[in-house]
Amino acid sequence: MARVRVLFLCTHNSARSQMAEALLRARSEGRIDVESAGTVATLVRPLALQVLSELGIDASAQTSKTLERFIDEPFDYVVTVCDAANDACPTFPNAGAREHWSLPDPSKATGSEEEQRAVYREVRDELEIRVMDLLRRIDASA
């Protein structure tokens, strides 16, 4: 049986989609092929990496990528994690299921570094809930 493939999309592939990728990879213990991409490639936000490391997840090897590199690849699930990416990618070729998770952009957080980190944690925790739900659904359909 082929491995399940999941693609997370966001505008800049710098925080939400990166955290979702790392969470699903870690929680599935590597049995799901997971990628993330953006409509524009930028950089992985250091605070995203920090709040993932608080859960024992090292995502430091992940890089920001554009969706063009995945456009012709088949995915069982394509999940947009920001409204702008959802609007920019209303359909994705070769996608089995399409989902949209509307989440706030933690990179827009203001205040002290600790206040910003708190926003990243909130988004990370919401992503964890949604990733675990997706994982349960994938396992139930296997």
Image (spheres, rainbow, N blue to C red):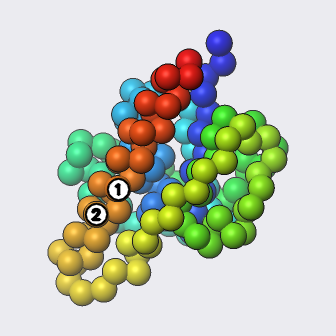
**SS of the residue under disc 1:** helix
Q: Residue at x 70, y 56 (%)?
A: 67
Front-most of residues 131 and 70: 131
Amino acid type of the residue that numbered disc 1 sits on in the rendered structure: Glu
Q: Residue at x 26, y 62 (%)?
A: 121
Answer left or right for 111 relative to 91.
left
Q: Quadrant of the C terminus?
A: top right
Place of residue 101 in the rendered image (x, y in percent of width and height, measured from the top left): 51, 58
Mark pair 1, 2: CA separation: 6 Å
Front-most of residues 37 and 85: 85
Answer left or right for 63 relative to 23.
right
Place of residue 47 in the rendered image (x, y in percent of width and height, measured from the top left): 31, 66
Place of residue 76 in the rendered image (x, y in percent of width and height, measured from the top left): 66, 35
Q: Which mark is residue 41?
A: none
Vertical placement of residue 134 versus 9, above or below: above
Place of residue 19 in the rendered image (x, y in percent of width and height, measured from the top left): 41, 53
Front-most of residues 136 and 38: 136
Q: Residues within 10 Å of mark 1 (few under 14, many from 20)?
A: some
Q: Which residue is mark 2?
A: 122
